[in-house]
Image: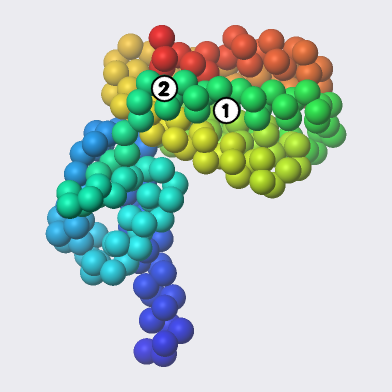
Amino acid sequence: MSTLDGELEQLSLVDLAVARISREILSGRTDPGERLVEEQLTRRFGISRAPLREALRLLAQRGLVEHVPRRGVRVATLSERDVRELYDLRDVLERHVVRTTLPVAPEALAGLRAALAAMRDATGDGDRLTAAEAHRKFHVALVALGDNHQLTAAYAATLEKIQLYMAVNLRREAEVADAADGVHRHAHLFTVVEGGDPAAVLAALDAHGARSYLD
């Protein structure tokens, strides 16, 4: 095996570990503050410690895990203040784009349409995690209408941390909420965005229930 092949294989193992660990965290299968034991993860994923540690480093950069001195790595925790500040940041970024960008050409809404379709499919399949990821992609696509790559990247990172908080409630939501409600709310929001009136979109966002997990 060449050096390049070895580097690519190592990179693919890192990507695999990042994808699997982040999915477990964002699905609520692991609790905030839960320790991630390297020996257990290397056995489960069939990888060595080097790619696992790189994966954990990348997840720490995304705010999904935390390195605790002398205690290893754990799933990140968010205080009530952290969550409220994340929602405030989300609101500021989202509303800035709505006010400064709409209306847009119909073809610019392709990302929103794709996310809404993925949301419908995942909800029909009963896959709440994929549906939640589609919710996130829908809102990222909305902000991407502003054609500001740095703003969109900051917004996407903010939403992922919010999803980390929301993951704690996925099991509870599955017991009490109609999964189709999320599809209906986002379909309505899409229709309003398609109409192109910033004031109407801002009103729809206010009624969208984005802070339901704080109530």
Q: Which residue is mark 1?
A: 89
Residue 182 in view, yes or no: no
Q: How is the image coloured?
A: rainbow
Report crowding for label 1: few under 14, some 14 to 19, many 20 or more residues within 10 A (C-alpha): some
Taking 42 as reference, is 51 left or right?
right
Give the image location of residue 2, x and y in percent. Answer: 41, 90
Residue located farthest toward the front when viewing the structure as drawn: 69
* Dot 1 amino acid type: Leu
Q: Which residue is mark 2?
A: 81
Report crowding for label 2: few under 14, some 14 to 19, many 20 or more residues within 10 A (C-alpha): few
* Dot 2 amino acid type: Arg
Q: Dot 1: what SS?
A: helix
**Residue name at image x 45 percent, y 14 percent:** 212
Question: Hey, which quadrant is residue 137 in on the image?
Answer: top right
Taking 138 as reference, is 51 left or right?
left
**Residue name at image x 35 percent, y 26 percent:** 79
Residue 184: which disc? none
**Residue name at image x 24 percent, y 36 percent:** 33
